Image (spheres, helix red, strand yellow):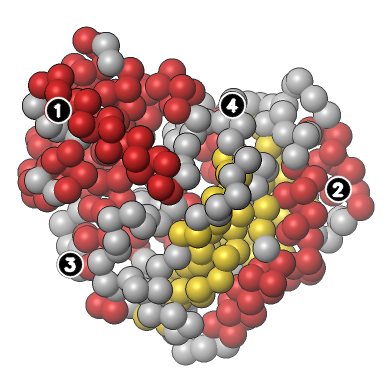
Amino acid sequence: MKLLTIAIPCYNSSAYMSKCIESLLPGGEDVEILIIDDGSKKDNTPEIADEYAAKYPTIIRAIHQQNKGHGGAVNTGIAEATGLYFKVVDSDDWVNKEAYMKLLNILREQLGGPTTLDMLISNYVYEKEGSKRKRVMHYPHAFPVDQLFGWKDVKPLAITHYVLMHSLIYRTALLRECHLVLPEHTFYVDNLVAFIPFPYVKTMYYADVNFYRYFIGRADQSVNEQVMIGRIDQQLYVNNEMIDYMGKQKNLMKQQRRLMLHSLEIIMTVSSVMLLRADTEESLKKKKELWKNLKKKDPRAYLHIRHGFTGGAMNLPGKGGRKVSITGYKLAQKLYGFN
C-alpha cells in the first residue's frame, strides 16, 4: 500500500501538466500519482498521461474518463486511491521539493505513532503570473506547529487567512467515511473539499512549509473575475451546498464550528462581491436570495456572518453601499493578489 495518493485532474492540460507531474515524482515509491484525464479532446493530454504511466509504471496510473468536470475527476481519484493519505494537485500547479519531502516524512512518522493522523496542513503560495510579490498563506498563529493536535488547540484564523484544498492532505479512509462526493460539471467544488470533511477530523498536524504552488493569472482560469461572474450560478450552487451542510451540523466542537464558519464567511463574501460586480437586477436578487437561504438554514451562522466584518461590508445599503463594498474588494485584491 502506498503512503500517499496524489490525484491530478487534467482537462486539456498538455501545456502545463508535465511541470506538475515532474514536481511530484521525487516522492518515489511511497507515492501513487493518478493522472485523471477528464475527457480531454482538444490536445494531447491523454497521450502525455499514458507516456508518464508507461515510464513510471509503479508510481503513475493514467485514468481516462468521460468528462465529468473537476469534481468528477476528484471523485475518481478518491475512489481509485490506494494510498493511506490523499491529496489533490491541480494540473497547472506544482509543489516545492523540500517541503514535499518534509510532509512525506511527517506522514511516515505519524504511521508509527499511537494516534491516527486525520489531516495534515501546510502552506500554499500564490504564484500569480506577472507578480513579483508572492503571497504565502500560512497559519502559525492558528495551529500549533510541528506537532499532533486536536480541535481544542485551534485558535481563530485571521480575517485574511483561509484554509483551501491546497493546504490539506487527508486520511483517505476519512474522505470515504464522510461520503465526500463532489458535484460533477461544476466549478469551485474545491471549496467543499476544505469543508465537508471537517466534522469527521479529530487529529491534525501543521507543517509551516511552503509546499503547494497555486498558479493564478491565466485569462481562462476559473478564478478569473470575469470567468467567475459568467459562472456565478455554479459558485452559488457550491455556496448553497455549504450552507445546507453547515445547517445540518449539530455536535461540532466550538473550534470546529468556528473554522467552518470562517470558510463559509469567505465563500459568502466571494459570492456576494461577484454578484455586486455583475451589477444587474437579477444578480442583486440572487444575492438577497443567498443571504435569505443562510438565514433560513442556519440562523446562528447567519447572525455570525451577516454581522461580522466582511458580511456587513457586503450588505451595505443602497447603491452607495455597493460602491463601498466593491472598493473594499478591489483594495483587498491589490493587497493580497488573489484572482
CA–CA distance between discs 1 and 2?
53 Å
The numbered disc on residue 321 is: 1
Say if mark 4 contacts mark 3, CB within 8 Å: no
- Assign a secondary structure to mark 4: loop
**In the rendered structure, which disc, 1 or 2, sits on the residue that comes first in sequence?**
2
Residue 254 locus on image (x, y percent): 17, 67
Relative placement, left or right, of 141 versus 243 is: right
Q: What residue is shown with label 3? A: 254
Question: Real-space Cα distance between discs 4 and 2?
Answer: 28 Å
Amino acid beneath label 1: Gly
SS type, badge 1: helix
Residue 177 vertical placement versus 214 (above, below): below
Q: CB of mark 4 within 8 Å of CB of mark 2?
A: no
Residue type pointed to by label 4: Ala
State which mark lies toward you, 1 or 3: 1
The quarter of the rendered structure image containing the N terminus is bottom right
Residue 227, how many percent across, how many down?
48, 23
Label 1 – label 4 distance at C-alpha: 29 Å
Q: Nearer the viewer, residue 169 or 154?
A: 154
The numbered mark, 1 or 3, whose residue comes first in the sequence reads 3
Which mark's residue is nearer the viewer, 4 or 2?
Answer: 4
The residue located at (10%, 37%) in the rendering is 295
Could you tell me residue 151's position as x and y percent? 29, 73
3D distance between C-alphas at marks 4 and 3? 40 Å
